[in-house]
Amino acid sequence: MRTSLFLVSHTIFTKQIQILTTFSALNLIETFCLIIPLEWWMPKKTYAYINDSVMKVLYSPFMVLIASWEIHSAKRVQKNRKIGEADDDVRHEWEMITEEEQDLFNDWTAKCARAVPDIDLDKPTQEILKLRNELRGKLDELDRKIHSTLASNSGSGSGGAGEENDS
């Protein structure tokens, strides 16, 4: 089981590295041909214009290739849908996981979700909200005890309401 997950993650990671190395070469071009020689002395607006123009020229061939591939894939999917077949008839190895591996993945996802801090609230605010919830629970419990005590006193005929007015 762990071996198959390793192979799947290794395959995906390797493909991502291949893609990133292609684009990292373009980042090197940006760094050594634009940022280092131009950014430090050129006005920001001019540098931004030059940088955007060069990046458009460098990345546009890749974007055209990606767009054409996506169009090709979309046409294949539309054709398959017209004839009533599945969108993609190729099963990739990362799609072939067992139920046990899926449960392992779901457990991991749940652990990650629990570990993510709430970045909207700072630590003291989180503590205050936690204490507020604890206090609400205790007040609700006290309220229930008071109501049960009053109900039992009024049910026994001891005249609890009259005694409270005398004191």
Image: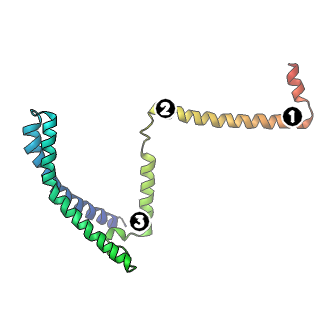
The residue labelled by disc 1 is: 153
Residue 6 in view (yes/no): yes
Crowd rating for badge 1 (residues with CA inside 10 Å; few <14, some 14–19, many 20+): some
Using the rendered view, name the quadrant where residue 63 is placed. bottom left
Q: Amino acid at mark 2?
A: Thr
Image marks 1 and 2: residues in contact by CB distance under 8 Å: no
Above-or-below relation of 167 to 48: above
Using the rendered view, name the quadrant where residue 143 is placed. top right
- Percent coordinates x, y for residue 166 in the rendering: 88, 19
- How far is disc 1 from disc 2 in space, using C-alphas? 41 Å
Q: Amino acid at mark 3?
A: Glu
The residue labelled by disc 3 is: 101
N-term-proximal mark, 1 vs 2: 2
Above-or-below relation of 155 to 91: above
Query: Is residue 11 rendered to the left or right of residue 153?
Result: left
- Percent coordinates x, y for residue 37 in the rendering: 6, 39
- Percent coordinates x, y for residue 60 in the rendering: 16, 56
The residue labelled by disc 2 is: 125
SS assignment at label 2: helix
Q: Amino acid at mark 1?
A: Asn
